[in-house]
Image (cartoon, rainbow, N blue to C red):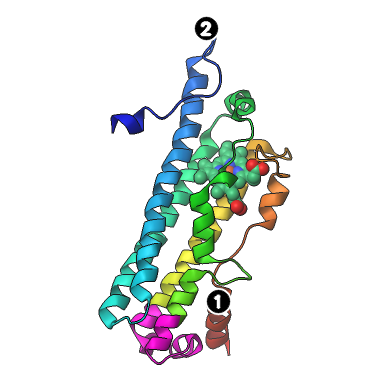
Amino acid sequence: METLLSLQEPKAPNTAGRAVVLAVAEQFFIITHQSCELWLKQLGADLDAAAEALLPPCDPHDLELGLEFLQRSGELIRVLQQQLAVLEKLPLRYFAEFRTYLDTASGAQSAQFRRLTALLGNSHHQGSLYEAFAAAAEYHGQSVHDVLRRGVECGVLHRLAEALVDLGNGYWHWKVAHLALVSKMIGEQDGTGGSSGVDFLARRVTRPFPELRRLRGKVHHS
Ligand code: HEM
């Protein structure tokens, strides 16, 4: 625990005239990023466990286990979004002061977030979790289309589909919350990672599990 608590090293120089409030603001910024990375670690582990449980051969007990992991992941992604949104309370005057010392460091370098995106997919591509769900459904003699069409009759397979859509919405909410935060903090400026900032991020707001959404909508409105 001591090691963990010693990792909040400010980047801005610790000059004699440096106000304590500035140091506290930078610590707030660092802790928010670090806590997000910690939760991403748990989320990645839970999603790996969910995919593993759904991998055929999967009996009903495996499907229930996969569901538990997916439902917890849905909650974790909400925690991540809230942790991020708290940064809206970072006073701009202090952020502007220590931002120059971030150099090219950026959240875009998060390998764990990239991994999350590969698992969930985006509006155009199915990620590996969807593939695992489709394989589990097929193993139980159903297509994804059947599961969505028959709904609650499909029991745990239906609940899995719902959990995936919830997870996808959580990810989407994270992206929107991040975009709102960035817009508030840097306006039209470029990102420290070299992107155009808000414009770049707005193009990356995406909704995972397009096939589930499409089939779900079709069933309930046809
Ligand atoms: C004041 C707070 C923040 C600002 C101004 C900010 C700004 C940005 C910007 C401009 C980008 C685009 C890449 C670049 O040019 O740097 C980016 C990407 C990213 N940031 Fe942040 N960010 C903030 C907080 C956070 C926090 C707390 C996290 C939590 C882990 C985070 C995670 C990410 C991730 C994962 C990406 C890549 C997004 C994607 O692939 O679509 N950011 N951020």
143 within the magenta span: yes
Q: Is residue 73 above or below residue 37?
A: below
Main SS, magenta residues: helix
| Label 1 C-beta lies within 8 Å of the nearest ligand 1 atom | no
Determine whether the residue tagged by mark 2 lies in a helix, strand or loop: loop
Which residue carries the number 1 mark? 213
Residue at the image position 46 percent from the left and 25 percent from the top: 9
- Quadrant occupied by the C terminus: bottom right
Q: Label 2 crowding class (10 Å Cα cut-off): few <14, some 14-19, many 20+?
A: few
Q: Is residue 117 above or below residue 18?
A: below
Residue at the image position 40 percent from the left and 92 percent from the top: 141
Which residue carries the number 2 mark? 16
Q: Observer-nearest residue: 116 or 185?
A: 116
Q: Nearer the viewer, mark 1 or mark 2?
A: 2
The percent coordinates of residue 117 (x first, y second) are 54, 60
Residue at the image position 50 percent from the left and 33 percent from the top: 29
Can you see residue 183? no
Q: Is residue 61 above or below residue 107?
A: below
Q: Observer-nearest residue: 28 or 45?
A: 45
154 within the magenta span: yes
Left or right side of 99 for 196: right
Range covered by the magenta-colored residues: 135-159
Q: Is residue 156 above or below residue 122?
A: below
Left or right side of 102 for 73: left
Determine whether the residue tagged by mark 1 lies in a helix, strand or loop: helix
Task: Return the residue found at the far front.
Answer: 57
User: Which quadrant of the figure has residue 5?
Assistant: top left
